[in-house]
Amino acid sequence: MAKKSTKELLERVATSLERMAPTPAAAADFDSADAFIWHGKQQRLAAVAKVSRVDIELLKGIDHTRDILVENTRRFAAGLPANNALLWGARGMGKSSLVKAAHKALNDGNLRLVEIHREDVETLPDLLALLREATGYRFIIFCDDLSFDAADTSYKSLKAALDGGLEGRPENVILYATSNRRHLLPRDMIENEQSTAISPSEAVQEKVSLSDRFGLWLGFHNCSQDDYLAMVDGYAKHFGIPLKRDKLHAAAIEWSVTRGARSGRVAWQFIQNIAGEQGVQLSR
């Protein structure tokens, strides 16, 4: 009787563990789209019918960083060695736009863009396991506006995923992330770890080493007025805005003054405004 009870108990425990186990990630139809969004809690990839992006020719003032990322992406798409990339720096200077534009420019049919949201970083190992099996495709995993605060420990999951653990990073996967911070962690978090740790230097290295997992660090800095106006000119020409150059520039400068900034984002917002005034339809 006791043996039977023990067996029943073990069966119940096994059943409970099966129910508690995470649901395996669902396979995706990678022929249905060239971009997907990863939903970590549901363990599934959702196809994106139309990606919001601009042509790479419209990205002005970032020529050097553009060329580096494009070449890295070209190598990866061709099956050659390439690096994970961290695009960091000033807001609105085209970091995420460059990732999406590079994907479009170099997609020869089997290159897929997969966006993972910041809050799903802990499920990155599950996504890597899923993509590892899709051997007919190559994947750029893209995480926009990546950073961590003092109460967040998920950066350790990202470090492990970037290194790939025992299996290594899947040969068909590369990771691109954007951030306003070069080291992804706030300075006060690093300094606090330094002041309270038994070995301050080791604590700092633990935090900074997260960025070291990215082979490419591409910096984006605030643009000059000439670069800003070049962005405006590029958009105006592309969308056929019927305004003389001197008037266009005067309006663009006034717009940047009211915003207190010059950037690719401000240039695009100005173009949206002036296109509305001129009755011009915009399609991206």
Image: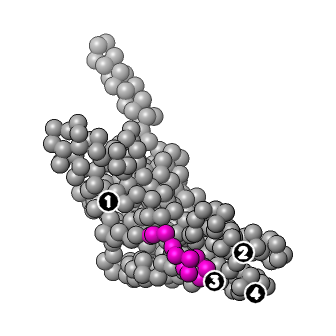
Query: How far across and down, in percent of the image, does residue 255 sit?
Result: 68, 68
Residue corresponding to mark 4: 244
Answer left or right for 195 relative to 141: left
**Mark 4 vs 2: CB contact within 8 A:** no
- From the viewer's side, name the closer residue of 137 and 284: 284
**Mark 4 vs 1: CB contact within 8 A:** no
Q: Is residue 134 magenta?
A: no
Query: How far across and down, in percent of the image, does residue 220 sit?
Result: 44, 70
Marks 3/4: CA–CA distance: 14 Å
Mark 1 or mark 2, earlier in chain = 1
Q: Residues within 10 Å of mark 1 (few under 14, many from 20)?
A: some
Relative vertical location of residue 247 with respect to residue 94 in this rendering, above or below: below
- Amino acid at pointer 2: Ala
**Mark 1 vs 3: CB contact within 8 A:** no
- Amino acid at pointer 1: Ser
Mark closer to the observer (4, 1): 4
Mark 2 or mark 3, earlier in chain = 3
- From the viewer's side, name the closer residue of 119 and 173: 119
Mark 4 or mark 1, earlier in chain = 1
Report helix, strand or loop for mark 3.
helix
Residue corresponding to mark 1: 211
Q: Which residues are magenta?
A: 220-230
Mark 3 or mark 4, earlier in chain = 3
Report helix, strand or loop for mark 2.
helix
Residue at figure coordinates x 34%, y 57% from the top left: 183
Report helix, strand or loop for mark 1.
helix
Residue corresponding to mark 3: 234
Residue at figure coordinates x 39%, y 65% from the top left: 86
